[in-house]
Image: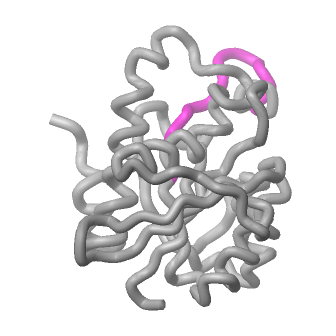
Amino acid sequence: MADTWLIIGLGNPGPRYEQTRHNVGQMVVDELASRRSAAFRQHKANARVAEAWLRPGAAKLVLAKPNTFMNVSGGPAANLAKFYGLGADRVVVVHDELDIPFDTIKLKTGGGHGGHNGVRDVAKALGTPDFARVRVGIGRPPGRQDPADWVLDAFGATERKTLPILVGDAADAVEHLAEEGLVAAQQRFHAPRP
């Protein structure tokens, strides 16, 4: 279905993880659903799914949050792509990115997983790394804190002040990607903020 996009927000299930850095992808998908008053429902693909339209007469967005833990997100992603008849070129994965400073968004298609186990599992399950990614910067941990612990911590007080703007900008990036394409979205969201 050329007019449909599968938008997968990566994260971990349950209240313990809702406000953690690793769940920023799901926060972005929640924002996209909220903008369209779309409700999530359980799907047989082991994910919560909300269907909405980019805008009237435009592309359909299938917003998805896997019920699985981050490292095994690929199964639900591949099952949803199959259910909706979509190739990897119609899949967008929204995820946290350690190697990008907090409050920064980068978009790309394909390439490596950069050590991100959720992205690795989606690429394995889809059989290709050639899907779009909206990478939401969370930055590296301070000092010697283990990155694995850092991503599972809640955002700090200073970060929480900016987080709604970051999540909104990432949702804008997904919309722009779906409507205008990757290059146009990169040109808009990779530019330094005024």
Instruction: In the rendered view, tell whether residue 43 sits above or below residue 23.
Output: below
Instruction: In the rendered view, tell whether residue 155 sits above or below residue 96.
Output: above
- The foreground one among 126 and 14 is 14
Instruction: In the rendered view, tell whether residue 104 sits above or below residue 176.
Output: above
* Residue 105 visible (yes or no): no
Residue for point 57% across, 13% down: 156
Is residue 51 one of those drawn in magenta?
no
Residue for point 39% across, 48% down: 37
- Residue lying at the far left in this picture: please name it: 194
Is residue 141 one of those drawn in magenta?
yes
Dividing the image into 4 quarters, which one contains the C terminus? top left
The stretch of residues the image draws in magenta is: 135-147
Residue for point 42% across, 90% down: 2
* Rendering coords of residue 140 (x, y %): 62, 30
- The foreground one among 156 and 62 is 62
Look at the image and name its color scheme: one colour
Instruction: In the rendered view, tell whether residue 90 sits above or below residue 55.
Output: below
* Rendering coords of residue 113 (x, y %): 69, 62
Residue for point 77% across, 69% down: 45
| Prevalent SS, magenta region | loop
* Rendering coords of residue 90 (x, y %): 50, 80
* Residue 9 visible (yes or no): yes
